[in-house]
Image: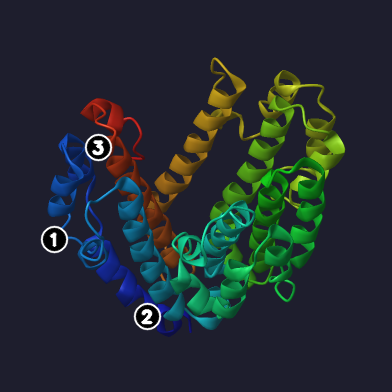
């Protein structure tokens, strides 16, 4: 019964893969000397429609939005054509963008930004699909962060935002709001994974576990590097993980500093993603890139083997996500007049 249920989305995936930009072209784009030249080079790609709507003069930020809108369009197309039991898990990728929408709004809620300026930071296509546009528009009009948080009272973010708001009132920083909303997203990964049929879980496991567990590890390491209170950190990470035991999480929470925490991480199966650098921030940043690259490599390696199961859309969606990451890195590097080799060093290839 599996093949008929996945036939529609496999057709979309096949078409989408045919439109992905190959590795050699991505590398060659690093030789581009201006954003105008970059957009010309992308005219024969699937990004042309979004790029053509970018107001001149082009900036890396404007192009990033164009690339991201294209990614959202691809996500929605895949989700809409996937079997019912897969849609909830795949929709987590859209929730990730909604989380970024919410964080973007809260970060400017107490500023003098106009509603139009706030909306310019939001991807409304996601909110339209999730049917949350009215909530977002209410938050956009809110004159302060308290009322912005209140706009989300009927969505699952309420508890996380209320907890983050208490920290904001004490510190004046939105960092806690951001972390608690992120935590809710990663807990949603685990929840939707649990709701998949057992036969599908096997194909989603590597994606879910690496996404969830890397967030927990990196959050705890960042917290230790910044000397955050262990009790606060306990609230900041998901209550459940995949390949990290509760005992290991408690050990990380109890670690006296970053060095002690890193030593614990190096005793886990995730040790291969960590190479000690000059600073804790560099060590964490390099590991974050290593996790992202590992997911991308896994997706590429399973293009052929994953068919008629949730692994097929996940593989394509991850490849598309990395393509957008690379195009964004290219546009930022070109705008900053970086050397070609330096730009290529920022790519995931």
Cα separation, mark 3 vs mark 2, equals: 40 Å
Rendered position, 11 above or below 184:
below
Q: Quadrant of residue 279?
A: top right
Q: Which residue is mark 2?
A: 7
Q: Which residue is mark 3?
A: 334
What residue do we see at 53% from left, 37% from top?
Answer: 288
Rendered position, 248 above or below 163:
above
- Determine contact: label 1, label 2, CB under 8 Å: no
Which label number is shown at residue 342?
A: none
Residue count near mark 3 (Cα–Cα under 10 Å), binned few <14, some 14–19, many ≥20: many
In this rendering, the count of numbered labels is 3
Q: Is residue 45 left or right of residue 8?
A: left
Rendered position, 296 above or below 153:
above
Task: Measuring from the top left, give residue 65's x and y in whole percent.
Answer: 37, 57
**Callout 3 secondary element:** helix
**Callout 1 secondary element:** loop
**Is residue 239 something one can see in this rendering?**
no
Task: Measuring from the top left, give residue 158's x and y in whole percent.
Answer: 75, 67
Residue count near mark 2 (Cα–Cα under 10 Å), binned few <14, some 14–19, many ≥20: some
From the image, state whether disc 1 or disc 2 is nearer to you.
1
Which residue reaches farthest top? Answer: 278
Of callouts 1 and 3, the N-terminal one: 1
Q: Is residue 225 left or right of residue 280?
A: right
């Amino acid at each position: 019964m599996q093949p008929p249920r996945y036939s529609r989305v496999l057709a979309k995936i096949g078409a989408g893969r045919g439109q992905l930009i190959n590795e050699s072209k991505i590398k060659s784009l690093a030789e581009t000397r201006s954003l105008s030249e970059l957009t010309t080079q992308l005219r024969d790609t699937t990004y042309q429609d979004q790029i053509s709507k970018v107001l001149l003069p082009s900036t890396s930020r404007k192009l990033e939005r164009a690339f991201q809108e294209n990614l959202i369009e691809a996500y929605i197309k895949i989700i809409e054509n996937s079997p019912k039991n897969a849609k909830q898990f795949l929709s987590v990728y859209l929730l990730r963008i909604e989380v970024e929408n919410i964080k973007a709004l809260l970060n400017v809620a107490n500023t003098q930004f106009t509603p139009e300026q706030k909306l310019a930071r939001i991807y409304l296509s996601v909110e339209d699909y999730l049917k949350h546009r009215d909530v977002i528009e209410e938050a956009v009009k809110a004159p302060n962060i308290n009322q912005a948080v209140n706009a989300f009272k009927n969505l699952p973010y309420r508890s996380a935002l209320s907890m983050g708001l208490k920290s904001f009132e004490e510190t004046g920083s939105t960092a806690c709001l951001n972390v608690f909303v992120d935590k809710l997203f990663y807990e949603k990964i685990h929840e939707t994974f649990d709701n998949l049929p057992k036969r599908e879980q096997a194909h989603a496991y590597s994606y879910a576990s690496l996404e969830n567990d890397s967030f927990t590890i990196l959050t705890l390491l960042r917290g230790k590097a910044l000397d955050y209170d262990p009790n606060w950190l306990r609230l900041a990470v998901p209550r459940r993980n995949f390949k990290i035991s509760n005992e290991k999480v408690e050990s990380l929470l109890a670690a006296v500093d970053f060095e002690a925490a890193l030593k614990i991480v190096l005793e886990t199966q995730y040790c291969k993603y960590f190479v000690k650098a000059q600073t804790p921030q560099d060590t964490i940043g390099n590991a974050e890139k290593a996790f992202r690259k590992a997911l991308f490599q896994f997706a590429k390696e399973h293009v052929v083997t994953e068919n008629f199961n949730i692994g097929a859309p996940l593989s394509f969606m991850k490849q598309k996500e990395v393509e957008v990451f690379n195009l964004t890195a290219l546009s930022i590097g070109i705008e900053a007049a970086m050397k070609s080799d330096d730009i290529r060093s920022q790519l995931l290839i």
